[in-house]
Amino acid sequence: MKKKFLRLGITLLLLTSFSTACSSLGVKDEAKPKTNTADTSASNGNESVKLRIMWWGSQARHDATLKMLDLYTKKHPNVTFEPEYSGFDGYLDKLSTEAASKNAPDIIQMDAAWLADWNARGQLSDLSTGININDVDPKLLETGEYNGKLTAVPLGGNAWGMIYDKSALEKLGIAPPKDGWTWEDYFSMGEKIKSMLGKDQYPFKDGTADSTLYANYQLSKGKGWPITQEGKFNYDKATWLEYANTFADLRKKGIVPPPDVQLADIDLDPTQDMLIKGQLIFKGMHAAQVSAYESLKPNSIGVAAIPKAEQPGGWLKATFYFSVNQDSKYKEEAKKFIDWFINDPEATEIDGTTRGIPISNNIVSVMKPKFNQGDQLTVEMIDMTAKSSQAFNPGAPGWADFGKEESDIKQQLMFGKITPEQAYDELAKAAKKYEK
């Protein structure tokens, strides 16, 4: 994907990463002989250290991260890097394969959804000391803790909301969503907009197979997360049937794309992203990705919170995390790098908001006057969501594989092979394999 994006001359795309380094926080590194044991990894400042670091993201994030690595090496000549980066697709598969063979990178960009399983397997180092986290919101830090230890350092503030094609709405004479808009507003706006669009244009996607949007919907109805953080199947049947039947009706009316068209949509791919191509108005999105959309569609992107019902449907979260491989020989050097990555003004200026709003409140105060339009939209979505949001659920240990079964069942429903009732029964049946 990277090569593809480079070839196309793009500037953006997705996601995360992280790394290491400890330091000047009262813990003086002891120069120790390099060994293969996990805890004797500190460099004496002269020993050559090569850190493997892995992240996913947009081209803008790749470019920024590579510049940061070069800068770090200039300041610490004994430390060089072996970067591994790509788009999101295939990232976890590659990382999991490397981890299974005890060959994972030293510093790994992690998503919140993966932390429960990686922590349960003891694959992440304790980062509780050696990194200055004094300027980080304690609530965000808690999302990276496991059994009282910090194993994942948040890299940026984030929110789950919606983006929309502002220019398209203006041309149609449709007012943008207001704070506190509801699911009824969302669906009725969709019906109104579709009547004004061309044959191959749609107001929004079919949410049938979108488990994130369904979680938004069920949360807003006051029914909790579909899968609880404790690992319990909690799809509310009445809410699910209401949701699935609503989208079945929209699908029948041609208001949402046909299944085959929708499944070809790839976020931030200029040739396959329906919103960028002018075929879609609204899309669920992380705040951290807004800058990338703004780059691809300048001055045309608007942001909104997730529609609400009795309760809000969206949430705040950290963008991504840096964790350190438990098997790394260079844990202390990795922590030193992470400390520099989140706290150094020169480093964070290079990174900008490619990983969301910087996690250090001190850094944000310094950078805010320099934010560009994309950065400002990122802050705007976070602020809109922060007014009323749900507590984020990073996922239950052992449930990572359920997502694929869940997607397969819902796609069968989207293609009309099963009914909403049968889909519910299949989801409940699949969940029994994961419930403890």
Image: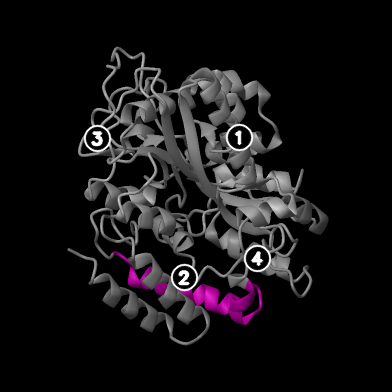
> What SS does tag 1 mark?
helix
Confirm or deny contact between disc 3 and disc 4 (CB under 8 A). no
Q: Residue at coordinates 48% horizontally, 30% vertically from top-left?
A: 80
Q: Amino acid at mark 3?
A: Ala
The magenta span reads 234-261
Q: Residue at coordinates 35% horizontally, 32% vertically from top-left?
A: 141
- Give the residue pinned by disc 3: 38
Tell me if residue 280 is in the magenta stretch.
no
Which is nearer the eye, 320 or 76? 76
| Numbered mark located on residue 243 in the image | 2
Res. 359 in view: no
Q: Earlier in the sequence, mark 1 or mark 2?
A: 1
Residue extending farthest right:
171
Res. 242 in view: yes
Label 2 CA crowd tier, 10 Å (few <14, some 14–19, many 20+): some
Residue extending farthest bottom:
417
Label 4 CA crowd tier, 10 Å (few <14, some 14–19, many 20+): many
Q: Which image quarter: residue 150?
A: top left
Task: Left or right? Give the position of 146 relative to 133.
Answer: left
- Give the residue pinned by disc 4: 190
Q: Earlier in the sequence, mark 3 or mark 1?
A: 3
Residue at mark 4 to residue at mark 1: CA–CA distance: 38 Å
Where residue 112 sits: x, y (%)? Answer: 38, 47
